[in-house]
Structures are given as structure tokens and as C-alpha cells.
Amino acid sequence: MSVSKTVNKGWVKLSLSKKTSENKVRTKKPSWIRVKLPIGKKYTDLRSTVEKNNLHTICVSGNCPNMGECWTEGTATFMILGNICTRSCGFCNVQTGSPLPADEFEPFKVARSINIMGVKHAVLTSVDRDDLKDGGSIIWAETVKAVRDLNPKTTIETLIPDFKGETENIDRIIEVAPEVVSHNLETVRRLTREVRVQAKYDRSLDVLKYLKDNGINRTKSGIMLGLGEEKHEVLETLNDLINVGVDIVTLGQYLQPSIKHLPVNSFITPEEFKEYEIIAKEMGFRHVESGPLVRSSYKAHKHVL
């Protein structure tokens, strides 16, 4: 921002070249935030299959930094119930608005994509569908069933929304018994209202507890770091998750999708991520994935064990 100053009879005139709000600059990433380009025959063959058959994965649409590694290991993530969300989380790059009607053929389409790709472990996720009475839970359940029918050897993780805490909708997920059911807390208690807007910290904990109490063998949650949380708050969040029976936790660096989204407050070092990993394992989590480029589905195939 350039400033010129003119003094005239006691008055000081400031001339600003641009408003500060129009001069936003995204924080430069540190050296350890480096994405390796996907390589290898298995990856290139799979990418060719995806493009040839016009298949849709959130790995590609979300430009996931771990896509090459995950695909090589036979893991892929699919988003159902459209690409327009009824919520407006400050970190998320998914469009907010009025979604299109649910596609009754989507369960088969997803199952077919998994079959064509030869996916060994499928992660299913979705936008929030607060516009639907069932929150999208019927399509959710039908998708898991369809994937199992067409791909009996494929294991499944469902990364679900909170369904507004309505247990009849959560029950539909429990009834189809995915190997892993995940629901992300995303951030610490203090920052939840700003980061997740329409979500509630305790409601998410209640969802995770309900899943565990009602027979889900592996529950999972994820936290983004770098949004302004303090270390003691991260530890409190990990403690809250272990207290509701969560088995698996992921911790990764928040990266700002655009200047319209929440800014990065800080970049957590690899050493700090390692410290959190050690602490979380000592707390009793079965699996801990902690690192700058870790995302919810990172090494997801290992979490069924």
C-alpha cells in the first residue's frame, strides 16, 4: 500500500493507492509444503482409466497432494450427493447454495467407478444436504450397499456429515456397517463457530460417540492445524476424541483455497506434527496420521486393520 501525504492548513491528506482489503496476498508456503508429482505406471494407467471412462473422484477434483500415493496403494475417494453444499464452512472450497435433487442412480455409478478402477479401499464422502429430510442418509446407505454388491472385496470408509445429530439418519450408516466411519471435528472448540459456521463442536462429538456406542468398530476424525489454535487446545481436542472412543485421528496443515477463504494463521512444522503424533499414540489412538500434507483419507487403507 503506497501512501502520499499533503499538509495544508493543519490538515493531513492521505492518498491510498488501493484499499487494504483489495491488496490481500496469500501467505507464502514454507519449503516443507511440497507436493510430489504423481508418477509410476500404476498411477498413469489408473489416471488413463479415469479419464477414458469419465469417472469422478474427489482426488482429482480436489487436487489432492497424496493422489499418486493413494492410487498406487489402491485407495480412492468419491464424493456423493452432488457438488453443492448447504453449509458455508470458511475453509472449504466446495460451492455453497441450493443443491440439485439427489440422483437415485448415483449408488450404481459410484460402485461402477470403483469396479472399473479396481479400487481396493474406497472412501466415500459427501456435501452436507440439510435441504433433504433424511440429510442424504438413504443415498448414503444405498451407495455402500451398491459398492459392496459390485465390489465384494473392496473395504469401505464413510466420511459422513453430522446429519444435524439426527440419530435415525446416523442409524442408516450404522446398519450398512462400513469398515470405518469417519466424521471430522476439523478444528478446536474455540474456532468451531468461525471455521465450521453451521456445525457444533459438541454435536460432532456426540455423533462420534453414538457411532461407537452403537456398534461401529472403527471410528475416525480429522483436525486441520494452522487456523490459530494453541497447542493446549489441540491436546484438549485429541482428549475429547479419545473420550468418545475414536480409534483413528488425522492431523494436517490447513491450506487456504483462495483469498475468499480463512487465511492461514501459521504453518506447523514437521517436527511439531511428529510431536502431536507421539502424544496422540500415547493417548491410545489406534492409528495416527500427522503431517503437513495429511488429509482425511491419507493411508486410509491401513485404518481397517
Image: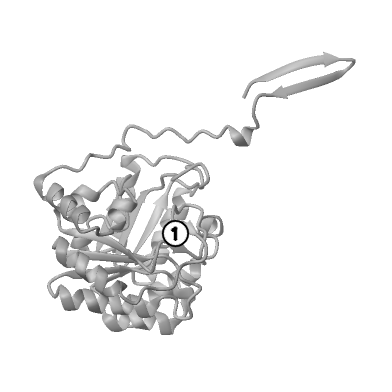
**Coordinates of residue 138 in the picture (x, y in percent):** 37, 80
Quadrant housing residue 289? bottom left
Answer above or below: position of 178 versus 56. below
Q: Which residue is mark 1?
A: 236
Quadrant housing residue 28? top left
Which image quadrant: the N terminus? top right
Answer above or below: position of 34 versus 275. above
Q: Is residue 120 left or right of residue 179?
A: left
**Coordinates of residue 41 in the picture (x, y in percent):** 9, 46
Q: Residue at x 27, y 60 (%)?
A: 77
**Coordinates of residue 2 in the picture (x, y in percent):** 64, 21
Residue 217 visible, this angle: no
The amino acid beneath tag 1 is: Glu
Q: Residue at x 16, y 51 (%)?
A: 48
Q: Nearer the viewer, residue 228 or 47?
A: 47
Q: Residue at x 31, y 36 (%)?
A: 32
**Coordinates of residue 95 in the picture (x, y in percent):** 47, 57
Q: Residue at x 64, y 28 (%)?
A: 18
Residue 230 visible, this angle: yes
The crowd level at tag 1 (other Cα within 10 Å; few <14, some 14-19, many 20+) is some
Which image quadrant: the C terminus? bottom left
Secondary element type, mark 1: helix
Answer above or below: position of 35 versus 222. above
